[in-house]
Image (cartoon, rainbow, N blue to C red):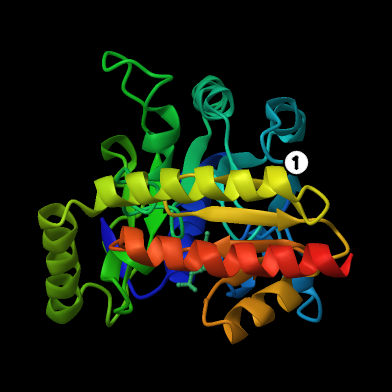
């Protein structure tokens, strides 16, 4: 583990790991995906698959290219003799809550093994129990992979829930590559201070004692089911609802803009965030109660009814 202070910094660690790993063979390229989000540093925006975050900050840091998400052939075609790593979010957050398929994750692992590439996961938003398991790839694969077939990426970045609101981040590197970034090649003054680590440990305690992974799973399933019923009643307003644990995206029909929807929900006392053009993203606290979930649902349903009436 390497401890740092934010998600963007954790991803910088992954980029440096990939560059150091490929350095002696002249490999430095990292393939990422369209609609991904990897942070606001210069390399973070180069890795991110959204034009709006790059605009005005050109020239981009070299060595990143994006291909469509959940498309193994696109990744395969993008690999060159200069490729060192593949980086994805197993659940794309800012991109609109798009979940990797188990086949995609398994295929990426196989491809990276065949081509000697690092498989890097950005779990900054989806990780740390938000989807009901420690990391989201574990939740996605829980039914697809048997206990006898362990699945591991080569490195994972984390932040957000890791500190439960206190600024901290980290990246984990698989044993096999643990010495790629040796002492002196990477460092951070405030990374892993006793205060940040004490907070992160306490967060682990609370998550375990209050069974918040189970709560994220149960409340997430409940919200998803109920929101899908709303979608079925009002398909002209809500296009689709998707999610995993407490990471849910409500995609509205394209005439409804996400920023407007989020502003309207805010005025009705529900905090959500936009993703893409028309997705309202729900990322409630992991200790969300059933009563709070129902209250939120009522607010969303009322807004959908009001929008349908106006149509
Ligand atoms: C998937 C992902 N990666 C990286 C980041 C950047 O994290 P931070 O804002 O802590 O730098 C974010 C933030 O939204 C994110 O969602």
Find numbered disc 1 in the image and state the secondary structure of the residue it sits on.
loop
Q: Which residue is mark 1?
A: 68
- Quadrant location of the C terminus? bottom right
**Residue 185 shows in the view:** no
Side of 308 where 85 appears, left or right: left
Residue at 48% over, 44% down = 244
- Quadrant location of the N terminus? bottom left
Image: 67 above or below 113: below
**Ligand 1 within 8 angstroms of badge 1 C-beta:** no
Side of 71 where 212 appears, left or right: left
Image: 99 above or below 52: above
- Residue 237 location, x and y as percent? 79, 57
Residue at 38% over, 68% down = 160
Side of 133 where 247 appears, left or right: right
Q: How many marks?
A: 1
- Residue 76 location, x and y as percent? 70, 27
Farthest residue in the bottom direction?
Answer: 267
Task: Using the image as rendered, state which of residue 215 and residue 118 is in the foreground.
Answer: 215
User: Crowdedness of circle 1 by 10 Å Cα count: few (<14), some, many (20+)?
Assistant: some
Residue at 85% over, 59% down = 254
Side of 278 where 26 appears, left or right: left
Farthest residue in the front direction?
Answer: 309
Task: Using the image as rendered, state which of residue 187 and residue 102 is in the foreground.
Answer: 102
Residue at 59% over, 28% down = 104
Image: 280 above or below 111: below
């Amino acid at each position: 583990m390497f401890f740092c202070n934010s998600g963007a910094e954790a991803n910088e660690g992954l980029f440096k790991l990939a560059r150091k790993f490929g350095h002696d063979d002249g490999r430095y390229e990292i393939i990422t995906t369209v609609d991904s989000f990897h942070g606001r540093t210069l390399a973070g925006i180069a890795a991110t698959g959204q034009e709006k975050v790059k605009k005005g900050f050109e020239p981009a840091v070299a060595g990143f290219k994006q291909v469509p998400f959940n498309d193994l052939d696109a990744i395969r075609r993008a690999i060159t003799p200069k490729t060192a790593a593949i980086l994805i979010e197993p659940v794309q957050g800012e991109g609109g809550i798009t979940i990797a398929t188990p086949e995609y994750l398994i295929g990426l692992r196989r491809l990276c093994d065949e081509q000697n590439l690092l498989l890097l996961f950005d779990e900054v938003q989806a990780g740390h129990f938000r989807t009901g398991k420690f990391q989201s790839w574990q939740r996605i694969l829980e039914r697809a992979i048997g206990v006898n077939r362990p699945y591991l990426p080569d490195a994972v970045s984390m932040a957000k829930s890791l500190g439960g609101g206190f600024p901290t981040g980290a990246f984990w590197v698989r044993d096999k590559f643990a010495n790629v970034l040796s002492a002196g090649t990477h460092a951070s003054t405030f990374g892993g201070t006793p205060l940040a680590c004490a907070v992160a440990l306490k967060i682990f305690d609370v998550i375990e004692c209050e069974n918040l992974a189970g709560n994220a799973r149960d409340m997430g399933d409940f919200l998803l089911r109920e929101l899908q019923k709303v979608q079925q009643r009002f398909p002209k307003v809500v296009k689709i609802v998707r999610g995993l644990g407490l990471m849910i995206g409500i995609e509205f029909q394209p005439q409804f803009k996400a920023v407007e929807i989020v502003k309207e929900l805010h005025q009705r006392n529900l905090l959500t965030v936009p993703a893409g053009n028309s997705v309202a993203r729900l990322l409630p606290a992991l200790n969300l109660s059933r009563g709070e979930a129902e209250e939120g649902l009522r607010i969303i349903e009322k807004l959908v009814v009001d929008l349908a009436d106006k149509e």
